[in-house]
Image (cartoon, grey):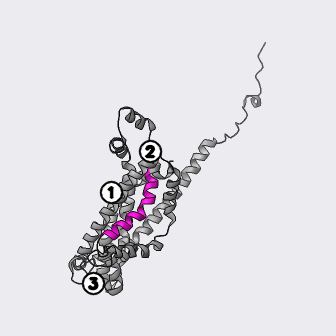
Amino acid sequence: MTAQIPAASTLVEPEAAPKKMPKATEGSIALRQKSIWATLLAATIAILWTIPTLGLLITSFRPQSEIRRSGWWTVWQDPEFTLANYEAALFGGSTNLSDYFVNSLVITIPAVIIPISIACMAAYGFAWIDFRGAGLLFIVVFALQIVPIQVTLIPLLTRFVDAGLNGTFWPIWIAHSIFALPLAIYLMHNFMNELPKELVEAARVDGAGHLTIFFKIMLPLMMPAIAAFAIFQFLWVWNDLLVGLTFGASPEVAPLTVRVAELVGSKGSQWHLLSAGAFISMVVPLIVFIAFQRFFVRGMLAGSVKG
């Protein structure tokens, strides 16, 4: 007997149905596309945000005649740079920004240290010391963040004048510290409250008191939050104009921002001095933020979402 060979049509396998892409793959592709668009948008915003700073930097190094003749974007055609603008802005008799630069440093450093020192101790008390009315008092401190600075300037100025502090750095230090304390206490408390309670309990079993726990356990662990708020406060105080103009009207204590604002009014046509003075005013915050931005982001997130 001969075996029957099946027909050719029966040997052909049916075409496989097209496979659908897994949902996980589709989601990852969509997420990747969104990430690309988000990156492009962020890069565009960064470029647009940087262009004025670049223009200010280039203008500050151009001669006065070139600034009046053409815009900074034409510098590539005939590049010509000079340091005379910075020399005139820093040491010129009509500007003398070097003294005001020192004043800004003298104002900013204590105005950062004072509120951080008080806020760390207050946050430790709210987080680890059980006393009557702690919750209500913390709510009051938190609510002080919504008080506008403008409504406190005249009463504070009156008190400082009555106390004989007008014309010194103390009014500016005290004002900046007062305005910074509510936010500082809130951030430090949230960060400290999330630290493991076993550390404090173990220290107490070993006989450690509050001072030992605070200085040897809490402060080293709180360095990210402290660094973040220190950067935030430094940038705020250095760039401040309102508080410095209110409590630092005297040239002996006026910050750099006050003097640059005066240049805008009195020497608005001298762009070589204005551009150099403005860049002198912003170079320190730029250096501080770029150098410590990782601490800023990490500490601010830790102190704002926990708790």
Above/below status of 201 relative to 178? above
Between residue 135 and residue 31, name the one nearer to us.
135
Which of the two discs, 2 and 1, sits closer to the camera? 2
Between residue 205 and residue 268, name the one nearer to us.
205
* The disc label shown at residue 127, or none: none
Residue 285 horizontal/vertical position (percent): 34, 65
Disc 2 marks which amino acid? Ile
Quarter residue 208 falls in: top left
Residue 205 horizontal/vertical position (percent): 39, 32
Q: Is residue 40 magenta?
A: no
Of mark 1 and mark 3, the one earlier in the sequence is 3
- The main secondary structure of the magenta stretch is helix
> What kind of element bears circle 2?
loop
Between residue 180 and residue 84, name the one nearer to us.
180
> How packed is label 2: few (under 14 Cα within 10 Å), some, or many (20 or more)?
few
Q: Which residue is mark 3?
A: 64
- Residue at 44% in and 55% down: 185
Which residues lie in the magenta part?
169-188
Which of the two discs, 1 and 3, sits closer to the camera? 1
- Number of numbered discs on residues: 3
Disc 3 marks which amino acid? Gln
Between residue 51 and residue 103, name the one nearer to us.
103
Disc 1 marks which amino acid? Ala
Residue 96 horizontal/vertical position (percent): 23, 79
Quarter holding the N terminus is top right
Verify CB contact (< 8 Å) between mark 3 and mark 2.
no
* The disc label shown at residue 129, or none: 2
Q: CA distance from mark 2 to mark 1?
A: 36 Å
> What kind of element bears circle 3?
helix
Of mark 2 and mark 1, the one earlier in the sequence is 2
Q: CA distance from mark 3 to mark 2?
A: 62 Å
Q: Is residue 124 left or right of residue 75?
A: right
